[in-house]
Amino acid sequence: MYKELKKFKTNNQFNFTTNDSLEEVCNASENGSGVFLVYAVVGEEKELIMVGSTGTVQNDGTLKSKNGGLFDKIVNGHQFAKTGRKYSWPAQMKIEKIERLEVYWYETFNEKTKGIPTFIEGLILQAYLDEKGTLPKWNVAF
């Protein structure tokens, strides 16, 4: 786990296979904003392949979040030029022969903690870049 995530107490994870419905297995908050990390699992190998976030902090210190929170961003966010990860993730997993995804999510901005979601996402991506020299393969850019 990345040290940047240790202070966020509202968090969880779920597994997703191509036989699952992403809407059914996703247990992410429908109201919360924050970050999510996606790991590809093939056999005993586990690799971070994506970091994402949702929620924007306004200049008055309030959070502007999309309806549906982290849940909606994970399930319906666009990726691989297709609508909704519920469709694009299974297709990409088949192409890359990924057995399952492990998705970890963290609510970074709430009453108790004020971690700007995109800032936390950037910290994790920077740590990954420092270690590997690239971004995770499902992150196109940052």
Image (tube, rainbow, N blue to C red):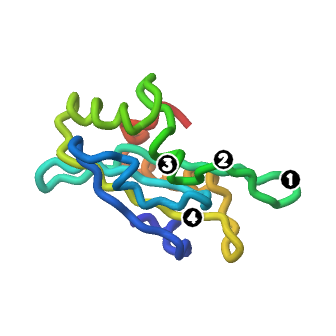
Mark closest to the chain's N terminus, 4 or 2: 2
7 sits left or right of 26 in the view: right
Query: Residue 30: horizontal and vertical position, in percent?
Result: 56, 57
Residue 125's disc is 3
Q: Quick check: 81 above or below 47?
A: above
Mark closest to the chain's N terminus, 1 or 3: 1
Element type where label 1 sits in the image: loop
Q: Which residue is mark 1?
A: 59
Circle 4 crowding by C-alpha within 10 Å: few under 14, some 14–19, many from 20: many
Element type where label 4 sits in the image: strand
* Residue depicted at x 74% and y 51%: 64
Q: Which residue is mark 2?
A: 66
Nearest-to-viewer mark from 3 and 2: 2
Query: Residue 110: horizontal and vertical position, in percent?
Result: 67, 68
Query: Residue 40: horizontal and vertical position, in percent?
Result: 27, 47
Element type where label 2 sits in the image: loop
- Identify which amino acid the numbered label 2 is placed on: Lys
Real-space Cα distance between discs 2 and 1? Answer: 17 Å
* Residue depicted at x 36% and y 31%: 88
Real-space Cα distance between discs 3 and 2? Answer: 22 Å
125 sits left or right of 109 in the view: left
68 sits left or right of 24 in the view: right
- Identify which amino acid the numbered label 4 is placed on: Glu
Proximity of marks 1 and 3: CB atoms separated by less than 8 Å: no
Q: Which residue is mark 4?
A: 107
